[in-house]
Image (cartoon, helix red, strand yellow):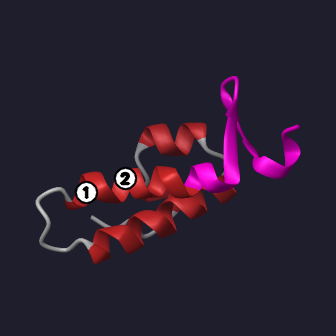
Amino acid sequence: MPYRSNDDLPPPVRSHLPPHAQDIYREAFNHAFASHSGDVRQEEIAHRTAWAAVKRSYVKVGEYWMPQQNVH
């Protein structure tokens, strides 16, 4: 199921990711979900794709997700 807004994202995503990372997650999820229509693993693939997209721009430092450029 595609997400219309960040408020619709799963609670773990909303509670752990900053707003911009949530935008990235939502957009990547929605795109992957649409791209894998009919695949029995559609939702799983979309979630994995969304996390991979977040990890290209953010890194987890301790319990917080930080933009890559802020981590040295």
Is 21 above or below relative to 14? below
Is 22 above or below relative to 70? below
Q: Position of residue 65 (x, y in %)?
A: 68, 39
Q: Is residue 69 left or right of residue 20?
A: right
* The N terminus, quarter of image: bottom left
* The C terminus, quarter of image: top right
Tell me, yes or no, whether the highlighted magenta stretch contains residue 47: no
Residue shown at 11% from the left, 59% from the top: 40
Question: Which quarter of the figure has residue 2?
Answer: bottom left
Q: In the image, which residues are magenta?
A: 54-72
Residue in front for this viewpoint, 56 or 15: 56
Q: Secondary structure at mark 1?
A: helix
Q: What amino acid does circle 1 point to?
A: Glu
Q: Residues within 10 Å of mark 1 (few under 14, many from 20)?
A: some
Residue shown at 12% from the left, 72% from the top: 38
Tell me the number on the disc at residue 43: 1
Q: Is residue 71 left or right of residue 24?
A: right
Q: Are marks 1 and 2 in contact (CB under 8 Å)?
A: yes
Q: Residues within 10 Å of mark 2 (few under 14, many from 20)?
A: some
Q: Which residue is mark 2?
A: 47
Is 38 above or below relative to 41? below
Q: CA distance from mark 1 to mark 2?
A: 6 Å
